[in-house]
Image (cartoon, helix red, strand yellow):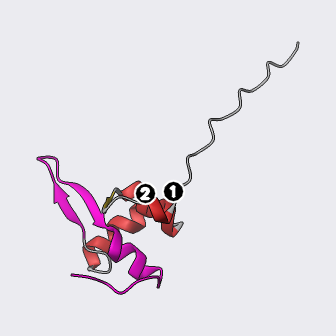
């Protein structure tokens, strides 16, 4: 029996801090901060990283400035 070769996984596109949009998704923020998406949602509920709710489903978006502030890279703008 021969083993079939495993296909190479598609490389993840790395986010660049310079090219970030003004509003970030849960998964983008989780990747930047290197935490789980669930952690990002919990931080939103606790007020550590406030979310903006969009559309009828209530999807979360996060301000780039708030994420950079958590990283200690910029002053938080409100």
Camera sees residue 50: yes
In the depicted structure, whether residue 63 falls above or below residue 61: below
Q: Residues within 10 Å of mark 1 (few under 14, many from 20)?
A: few
The magenta span reads 51-78
- The structure residue drawn at horizontal position 47% and vertical position 80%, both measured from the top left corner, is 71
- Tell me the number on the disc at residue 15: 1
Determine which quarter of the picture holds residue 26: bottom left
Residues tagged 2 and 1 counted as in contact (Cβ below 8 A): yes
Relative depth, front residue between 45 and 32: 32
Q: Position of residue 74 (x, y in %)?
A: 41, 83
Tell me the residue that label 2 is attached to.
28
Q: Position of residue 69 (x, y in %)?
A: 39, 82
Relative depth, front residue between 21 and 55: 21
Q: Nearer the viewer, mark 2 or mark 1?
A: 1
On whether residue 77 falls in the magenta region, the answer is: yes
- The structure residue drawn at horizontal position 71% and vertical position 26%, both measured from the top left corner, is 7
Q: Is residue 3 left or right of residue 47?
A: right
Q: CA distance from mark 2 to mark 1?
A: 8 Å
Q: Residues within 10 Å of mark 2 (few under 14, many from 20)?
A: some
Identify the element where label 1 is drawn.
loop
Q: Which of disc 1 and disc 2 is earlier in sequence?
A: 1
Q: Position of residue 70 (x, y in %)?
A: 42, 81
In the depicted structure, whether residue 65 falls above or below residue 75: above
- The structure residue drawn at horizontal position 87% and vertical position 15%, both measured from the top left corner, is 2
Return the residue found at the far top. 1
In the depicted structure, whether residue 14 falls above or below residue 71: above
Identify the element where label 2 is drawn.
helix
Q: Is residue 55 left or right of residue 28?
A: left
On whether residue 69 falls in the magenta region, the answer is: yes
Return the residue found at the far right. 1
Determine which quarter of the picture holds residue 77: bottom left
Determine which quarter of the picture holds residue 44: bottom left
């Amino acid at each position: 029996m021969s083993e079939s070769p495993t296909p190479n996984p598609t490389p993840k596109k790395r986010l660049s801090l310079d090219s970030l949009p003004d509003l970030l998704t849960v998964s983008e923020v989780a990747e930047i901060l290197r935490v789980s998406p669930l952690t990002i949602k919990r931080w939103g509920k606790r007020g550590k990283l406030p979310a903006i709710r969009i559309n009828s489903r209530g999807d979360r978006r996060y301000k780039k400035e708030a994420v950079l502030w958590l990283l200690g890279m910029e002053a938080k703008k409100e």
